[in-house]
Amino acid sequence: MSDHPVRLLWSLAGSNLGTTINAAGNSGAYQQPGPPPWTPNALTPVDLRHVDDVWLTVQAATVSGGTPSLTVSLGAFDDQGNLYSSLVSVPALTAAGAAGRQQIAAGRHGASAGTYLVFPAWGQVAWAVSGTTPVFGAVDISLWGR
């Protein structure tokens, strides 16, 4: 049994960004700290400082448009705020409900060589859409960590 509790690191529903997706977006940019004194505790909405492993999930209640596709990824920022996008990505979501759920786990205990990662302090959840007028409704994107 682990003494490190699982916690929700970021969710689309809790972000006030809305849960209908029809264009690319992300959880937020890196905030460059000003001159000292400054707090290092809010540089991005995705705090990875105390995380060894993550589980990224996505599903949508409705999907419409011609050949719609939604891809969600976790990127990370270096100490200067440079984004390293798509450390890991879920497979493309193309269907609604349980049939379209996608997920990926990564970190120190990754499932395969491509998912073994050491995380920096700050990250970003990002999404991209493709297709002809794609609309994904009631989207749930969640990033859990331990």
Image (cartoon, grey):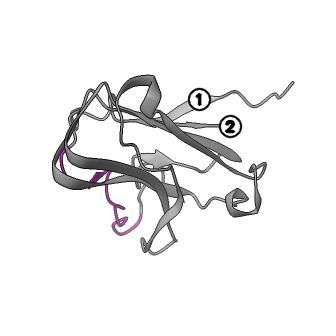
Answer few, some or many: residues within 10 Å of disc 1's Cα (few below 14, many 20 plus, some between 14 and 19): few
Question: Could you say where residue 113 lies in the image, as x and y percent from the top left?
Answer: 76, 62
Which mark is on residue 146?
2
Q: Residue at x 41, y 58 (%)?
A: 38
The residue wearing badge 1 is 7
Give the amino acid type for the residue marked by disc 2 in the picture: Arg
Q: Which residue reaches farthest front?
A: 66
Q: Quadrant of the N terminus?
A: top right
Answer few, some or many: residues within 10 Å of disc 2's Cα (few below 14, many 20 plus, some between 14 and 19): some
Q: Quadrant of the C terminus?
A: top right
Which image quadrant is residue 11 in?
top left
Highlighted range, magenta = 22-36
Give the amino acid type for the residue marked by disc 1 in the picture: Arg
- Element type where label 1 sits in the image: strand
Q: Is residue 26 above or below residue 141?
A: below
**Residue 121 visible, this orientation:** yes
Q: Badges 2 and 1: C-beta atoms under 8 Å apart?
A: yes
